[in-house]
Image: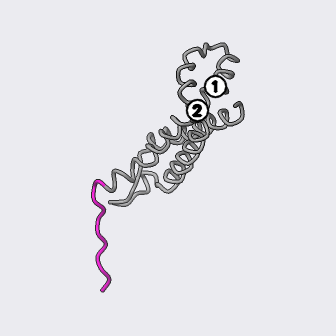
Amino acid sequence: MPPEPTQPRSSDRFVRDTGATVLTLGGVAAAFGVASCCGLPFLLATIGVSSAWLVGIATLAAPHRPLLLALGAICLVAGGMLLWRRRPAAACATGAVCSKPAVRGMTFAALVAGFALLTIGYLYA
């Protein structure tokens, strides 16, 4: 007789449910730091928005640019993989790792924005 499957602890499910969102936010923060130096001020000036407020962030982030670039890429890829592995709430069985459609959509939008910032920071520096 095969052993009965055990239910995951609630703390394990919480970590798996929020992992994609947390990694995505970390990746977006790192990508913002990379893009704040050169690419983001250029794009903001193109559309007529002042970018003087980015000087402080750029001063702190510029020496750590390669580390932030690598960290942002790793976090965004890992967040995308975790998001891809999650199933929508409608297709979930009891006890499975699921996500609400709004959280999934916002995490996906943040992933796209993070990859755009990372690309801008890489290309315009």
x 57%, y 19%: residue: 55
In the rendered image, residue 85, in percent from the top left (x then y), is placed at: 50, 57
Q: Quadrant of the C terminus?
A: top right
Find residue 40 and name its label. Answer: 1
Q: Residue furthest front?
A: 63
Camera-side residue of 88 and 124: 124
Q: Amino acid at mark 1?
A: Leu
Find residue 63 and name its label. Answer: 2
Whether 6 is among the magenta residues is yes
Q: Is residue 115 above or below residue 77?
A: above
Q: Residues within 10 Å of mark 1 (few under 14, many from 20)?
A: many
Rounded to the nearest angstrom, the CA distance separating label 2 from label 1 is: 17 Å
Q: Quadrant of the N terminus?
A: bottom left
- Span of residues in magenta: 1-11
N-terminal label among 2 and 1: 1
x 60%, y 36%: residue: 65
Find residue 120 and name its label. Answer: none
Q: Amino acid at mark 2?
A: Pro
The quadrant in which residue 54 appears is top right
The reply, left or right, for residue 66 in relation to residue 8 is right
x 46%, y 51%: residue: 88
